[in-house]
Each structure stands twice: as C-alpha cells, then as structure tokens.
Image: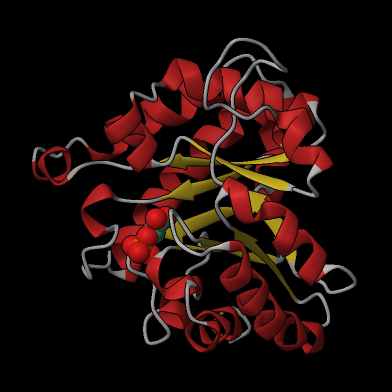
C-alpha cells in the first residue's frame, strides 16, 4: 500500500524563538513545491512553538511538540498538556523519545497515558520505540521494540490507531553518527508492522513507521526506499534548512 512519507524534525533543546522563526521561514517556501507528496513537520522546544506556528502559517509545513503531560491541567510543575499544545497550533506530538525514556523516567505506561491524552485532544502522536546497543547485541531488538509498541498502544482500538505514527529509533544510532543499515531498519519496521496488524488488522497498512537515528542527506533516500520505512524522524540534521530539505527530498526518490 502506498503511504505518504512523513518527515519530522526533532529540534530537541535547540533554537530560541528568533532562531525558530528564521529556520521556519527558510523551510516553508522549500516545502511548498512538494505539493503534498511528502508530509513535513518540525518540533521546536515549547518556548518556540508560538513563534514557529506564526512563521509557518499558510505553508504546508506542520508543527510538532516534543513531549506532553497526560493530564489536561493540574499541579505538574514544568509540564504542558495536550490542549495547551493544540491551542499553540501543534498537530503532532512526539511521545516516548529515548531521551525521555533514559533521562526523564518515561515508561511504556506513561507513553500509553500520553498517547491517550494526545488523541483525546485531536492531535497526532509519534510514538518512539528503540533498543539500546546492549539489547541489540543480546539479540533482543524485536522483543524490546515489540514490548514498547504494545505497551505504548495498549487499549487503543483500530480507529484511534489510524492517527498514530510510529518511529523506530535505535538508541545506538541517535546522535552518534551510526545509522542502521536500510536492511536493519526494514527488518524492524516489518516486525513492527506485523504487530500493528495484530492490533488493528488491515488498518496497519496505512500507519506510517518512521526511521530515526543519524538520518542525513546522504543516507535518507536509501533508508526511505525500504518498503516499510515511511519517513524519518530527524534530530541533528533538522537544525539546518539545507540538510533537512535534502532529507525531505530523499523521501521523493
Ligand atoms: C532523534 O533525536 O530523534 C534523532 C533521530 O536524532 P539524530 O537524527 O540526531 O540521531
């Protein structure tokens, strides 16, 4: 089944409001000629969301956030809720990024609650899964990503699952310059698709599975040429307009 490829830039803790405006203003005109053949989003830090939303207005470039709390409001110092993100113009929310799992105590259970909150606010979750190097070397990759996927999506039925994007991000490839080979990525994506079929039948064929982990202009096209690699979640290379747009163009090849 043909799925529109989806490339999202995860800016992590980079870019002030002024820098976000500048990068979005550089990207937006480059996205317009894509004619919707690739879906493109950027996920700035919370403080730059409003500036980015304003700068991308009227362009096909979409806005994402990097995290969310599962409650709508309350005594959760430092947290931001899904309705707050929706009001800021956000469409996509990254949930369960490995940095959140490793540095901030994210678990499959908090991922599940966050995915529920994102969907309840009519936003679209990008659910990240990925194994560490030790887990890969122990032959546990499919077991780990399978557990993370089932845990993060548990309780969701077919119509809700249609709104989900999955991102396979091997932890050993994030920010390290080491990329999974296209064959390694395809193997895991195919296994994730099989789990999605168990969860929602034929609906799994329309769910996008992005690859993330040191995606660069020179490896993006090859990775996204694999049958189950439906786009990319891009960290470092999304911070420069030229690199990011070359990656986006790689999705067209
Ligand atoms: C990420 O943070 O989601 C990521 C894939 O980072 P990088 O592209 O820098 O490896």
Q: Residue at x 27, y 62 (%)?
A: 175
Please indicate, yes or no, whether residue 99 appears anywhere in the rendered image.
yes
Quadrant of picture, ligand 1: bottom left
Report x, y in % for residue 85.
Answer: 73, 39
Question: Relative to residue 203, is residue 145 drawn left or right?
Answer: left
* Front position in the image: 135 or 128: 128
* Front position in the image: 190 or 104: 104
Report x, y in % for residue 75.
Answer: 59, 10
* Front position in the image: 134 or 115: 115
209 vs 218: above or below: above
Q: Quadrant of the N terminus?
A: bottom right
How many numbered marks, from 0 up?
0
> Most extreme residue toward the right, as rendered?
58
202 vs 7: above or below: above
134 vs 241: above or below: above
Q: What is the quadrant of residue 248 in the picture?
A: bottom right
Please indicate, yes or no, whether residue 186 appears anywhere in the rendered image.
no
Question: Relative to residue 229, is residue 187 drawn left or right?
Answer: left
Report x, y in % for residue 47.
Answer: 60, 49
Q: Residue at x 55, y 20 (%)?
A: 112
Q: Residue at x 72, y 21 (%)?
A: 157
> Most extreme residue toward the top, as rendered?
75
Q: Residue at x 29, y 34 (%)?
A: 103
> Is the image coloured rainbow, by chain, by secondary structure, or in one colour?
secondary structure
Q: What is the quadrant of residue 222 in the picture?
A: bottom left
Q: Quadrant of the C terminus?
A: bottom right
Report x, y in % for residue 39.
Answer: 72, 67
Q: What is the quadrant of residue 163 in the picture?
A: top right
Question: Relative to residue 175, is residue 226 drawn left or right?
Answer: right
């Amino acid at each position: 089944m043909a799925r529109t490829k989806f490339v999202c830039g995860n800016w992590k803790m980079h870019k002030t409001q002024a820098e976000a405006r500048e990068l979005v203003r550089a990207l937006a005109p480059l996205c317009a000629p894509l004619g919707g053949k690739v879906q493109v989003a950027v996920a700035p830090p919370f403080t730059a969301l409003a500036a980015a939303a304003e700068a991308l207005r009227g362009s096909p470039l979409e806005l994402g956030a990097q995290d969310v709390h599962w409650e709508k409001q309350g005594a959760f110092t430092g947290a931001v809720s899904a309705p707050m993100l929706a009001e800021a113009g956000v469409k996509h929310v990254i949930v369960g990024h490995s940095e959140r799992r490793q540095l901030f105590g994210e678990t499959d259970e908090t991922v599940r609650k966050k995915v529920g909150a994102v969907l309840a606010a009519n936003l679209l979750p990008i659910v990240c899964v990925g194994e560490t190097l030790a887990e890969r070397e122990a032959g546990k990759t499919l077991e780990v990503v399978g557990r993370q996927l089932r845990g993060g999506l548990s309780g969701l039925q077919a119509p809700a699952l249609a709104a989900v994007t999955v991102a396979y991000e091997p932890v050993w490839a994030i920010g390290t310059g080491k990329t999974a080979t296209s064959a390694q990525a395809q193997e895991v994506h195919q296994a994730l698709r099989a789990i999605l079929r168990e969860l929602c039948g034929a609906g799994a064929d329309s769910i996008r599975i992005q690859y993330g982990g040191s995606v660069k202009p020179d490896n993006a096209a090859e990775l996204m040429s694999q049958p189950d690699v439906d786009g990319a979640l891009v960290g470092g290379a999304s911070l420069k307009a030229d690199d990011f747009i070359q990656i986006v163009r790689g999705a067209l090849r």
